[in-house]
Amino acid sequence: MSARTDTTPPPSAETIAVTAPAAAAGERADRFLAGAIGSLSRSRVKALIEAGHARRDGAPLTDPAQPVRAGARYELRLPPPAPATPVAQPIPLAVLYEDADLIVLDKPAGLVVHPAPGNPDGTLVNALLAHAGAELPGIGGEQRPGIVHRLDKDTSGVMVVAKTERAHRALAHAFAERREELERTYLALAWGLPAPPAGAIEAPIGRHPADRKRMAVVPAGRGKPALTRYATERAFGTACALLRCRLATGRTHQIRVHLAHMGHPVVGDPVYGRRIPAAARALPPPLRAALLGFPRQALHAATLGFRHPVTGAALRFESPLPADMAGLLARLGGWAPAGNEE
């Protein structure tokens, strides 16, 4: 598809402009833009570039791998959301539990939850519409039918989806109120070794003051209260640690923002862990390269527990680590000095 040659986007479109600093020279255009913008994954930026929505110094940019030119002005146009109702697509789902009211599934990394600019289809919603048939459309809204909570595209793990309006209202209320019976725990591979090895991060989260596409820890009164409890499952020397994090609140990117604020960003996080951490120096070069090159944030929704919205029964589901994270931990386990388990 050829690039657009007009310079005036449709009124409902949004254009993001970024000037490349000297430090970015030679970097892939899609990687640079994803990191500079913060709120878009590299795969989405790549798709937008290939679809003709990018420019460099006013000229069309259609190659995502084109090296960045220092001082150049890059523009990325974000098309408006497609107005059409999502369509059913036969995408395989890993269903952990299903009844007349809800579906619990294990979302793989790389699957977008609902359609958005750059990801108009091939999403979890499209798969759910094919799986549930006539039960799902319209529940909770046409664009996000059945969706109660969301996992980022590159975060894997357990999710619950409502199949009835009654279930949707009850589950949405439980997630919004952060009821005590709601259990959401994540496993995160983070850089460095937290001190203390277990504790709580309580800091309000709001929009980044200089980059409205990112979230950040902000002064009280400018953001929403946020509390993350963490415990070190295993330490790999001083290079990194596997953390079990439990959400006491549910803010956008909460674990990623809190861990980065603490000085221990999630391995592979393209938004909140852009710089090479000093802790990486403790690793042998091949292992360091494997962690620095991990293609997504190493974050997994391991456990989800809640009350059934209709029967009131206590439900709890677990998802094992996906193969990519398990493989990374296996490599670390083969290297880490003895006595580093917590």
Image (tube, grey):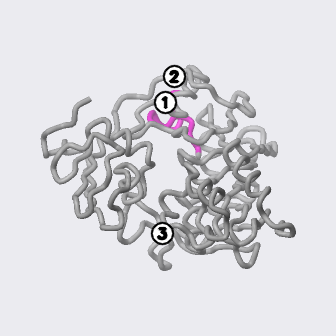
- Distance (Cα) linking label 2 and label 3: 36 Å
**Residue depicted at x 84% and y 66%:** 341
Q: Which residue is mark 2?
A: 89
To which residue does mark 1 refer?
Answer: 122
Residue 138 among those drawn in magenta: yes
Tell me which corner region of the image, top left, top right, bottom left or bottom right, holds residue 27.
bottom left
Contact, mark 1 vs mark 2 (Cβ under 8 Å): yes
Which element is circle 2 on? Answer: loop
Res. 277 image quadrant: bottom right
Question: Of marks 1 and 2, which one's residue comes earlier in the chain?
Answer: 2
Q: Earlier in the sequence, mark 3 or mark 1?
A: 1
Of residues 6 and 140, the one nearer the viewer is 6
In the rendered view, would you say 174 is above or below 240?
above
Query: Amino acid type of disc 2?
Result: Gln
Q: Secondary structure at mark 1?
A: loop
Q: Earlier in the sequence, mark 2 or mark 3?
A: 2
Determine crowd level at label 1: few under 14, some 14-19, many 20+ residues with C-alpha closer than 10 A: some
In the image, what residue type sits under mark 1?
Answer: Gly
Q: Is residue 98 magenta?
A: no
In the picture, measured across the screen, residue 49 lies left or right of residue 172, that is left
Looking at this view, is 272 or 215 the one in front?
272
Residue 254, how many percent across, how many down? 57, 62
Part of the protein shown in magenta: 137-148
Taking the image as shown, residue 6 lies to the left or right of residue 303, namely left
Front one among 50 and 257: 50
Q: Residue 308, image x and y in percent?
A: 74, 42
- Residue ranking furthest to the front: 285
Q: Which residue is mark 3?
A: 216
Q: Check if mark 3's residue and mark 1's residue have beta carbons within 8 Å.
A: no
Circles 2, 3 touching at the beta carbon (< 8 Å): no
